[in-house]
Image (tube, helix red, strand yellow):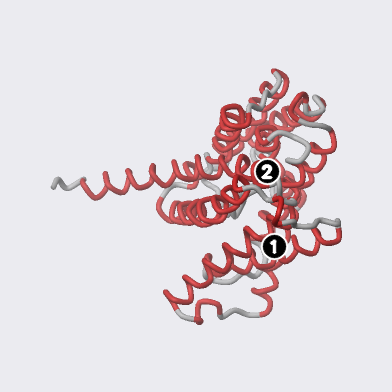
Amino acid sequence: MTPDTPDRRSSILVWVALGIVYVVWGSTYLGIAIMIETMPPMLSGAMRFLTAALLLGSFLVLRKGREVFRMTRRQFGGAALIGLLLLTGGNGMVAVAEQHISSGLAALLVASVPLWLVVFRIAVRDRPGVLTLAGVLVGFGGVAAVSLSGGGAGGDATGIVVILLASASWSVGSFLSGRIAMPANTFAASTIEMVAGGLGMIVVGTVAGERLDLAVVSGRSWAALAYLVLVGSLVGFTAYTWLLGNAPISLVSTYAYVNPVVAVILGVLILSEQPTAQILLGGLVILVGVALVVSTERRRPVKTPEPAEAVSTTT
C-alpha cells in the first residue's frame, strides 16, 4: 500500500456518499409523486417520518443508550419547532403541491431555498457579498419565469403557490436551526424533528379531511413509501451527515443544484413528465443563481438540512 492510499480511499468514500445524496435526494420527488397516487399527502408523510423516527431512535438507543436523548426542554422544543417547519410545512406541502404540479417542477422551485436563506440573512442585517446578491437576483428571476408559466403542462398555479410556501417554510426552519437551542447529538435532534413533523402532518391532514383507505392503496405506493423511509430518510440523511464531517461544505452544498436535475430526469423517464421549454429555461436560471450563491458562500459554515425532503430533505 502506498502512503496516499488512506487519502485516496477517503476521497472515494466522499464521492460515493455525495453520489448517494445526489441520486437519493433527487429521487425523493419521484417517490413522493408515486406515493400520493393512492395515499393522502399529509397522512402518508406522517407514516414516512414516524416510521423513520422509530427506526433511527431505536438504533440510537441500542448503540448509545438512552443518554443520547438527554436534553433540556429548550433543546427539545427547538428540535420540535424545526421539525414542524421543515417536515410538516416543508415536506408536507411539497407532497400537497405534487398533486397539482410535476415532480420535476416541484424540485426546480424547491431549489430556491438557498436564495431564501440569503434573504433571511439580510433581514437580520448580515450583509452578504455582491456576488451572493447577484446570485439571489438571478435565481429569483428564474423562479419568477417558472411561476409565471403557470406550471405549463406539468401543473397549475395552485401547486406553484403551495410549493413556494413549502420552500419558505423549509427556509425558515433551515435559518433558525443554527440560531436556537438544539440537542447536541445530530441524529437525536433529527429523530425529534421527524416525530414532531410526523405528528404535525397527522393534525394538518386530519383537519384538511384526509382519510387513508388501505383498501385502495396500491403496491406501487407502498413501495414508494418504503423507499422514502429506508433510502430517502435514513440512507440519504446518514450519507449527508457523514459528508458534513468529512468533506468541504462547498462540495457538499452542490446537492442544492444537482438534486433538481436528477428529479427532472427521473420524472421524464419514469412518469413521462413533459416540462415546457419555459420551465426548463427558468429552472436553469434558478440553478445558475443557486450555484453562484453556493460557490461564493463556500467559506461560510452553514448548517443546511435535507431538501424538501428533507432532513429529506429532504425530502
Q: Is residue 129 among the parts visible in the rendering?
A: yes
Mark 2 crowdedness (10 Å alpha carbons): few <14, some 14-19, many ≥20: many
* Residue on which disc 2 sits: 113
Could you tell me residue 279's position as x and y percent? 71, 24
Q: Is residue 313 among the parts visible in the rendering?
A: no
Q: Report which quarter residue 311 is drawn in.
A: bottom right
Q: Secondary structure at mark 1?
A: helix
Please state which of residues 258 and 41 is positioned toward the viewer in this rendering: 41
Could you tell me residue 286's position as x and y percent? 67, 30
Of all residues shown, which one is farthest toward the top?
A: 277
Please state which of residues 130 and 33 is positioned toward the viewer in this rendering: 33
Of all residues shown, which one is farthest toward the left?
A: 1
Q: Residue at x 64, y 39 (%)?
A: 129
Mark 1 crowdedness (10 Å alpha carbons): few <14, some 14-19, many ≥20: many
The amino acid type found where label 1 is placed reads Gly
Mark closer to the observer (1, 2): 1
The amino acid type found where label 2 is placed reads Val
Asked if marks 1 and 2 touch (Cβ < 8 Å), the reply is: no
State whether residue 124 is above or below residue 69: above
State whether residue 105 is above or below residue 277: below
* Residue on which disc 1 sits: 197
Q: Report which quarter residue 245 is drawn in.
A: bottom left
The answer to whether residue 265 is left or right of residue 46 is left
In primary-sequence order, the first of circles 1 and 2 is 2
Could you tell me residue 153's position as x and y percent? 76, 24
Q: Secondary structure at mark 2?
A: helix
Q: Which mark is residue 56?
A: none
Could you tell me residue 100's position as x and y percent? 78, 37
Real-space Cα separation, disc 1 to disc 2, in angstroms:
19 Å
State whether residue 300 is above or below residue 58: above
Q: Residue at x 61, y 37 (%)?
A: 293
**Number of numbered discs present?**
2
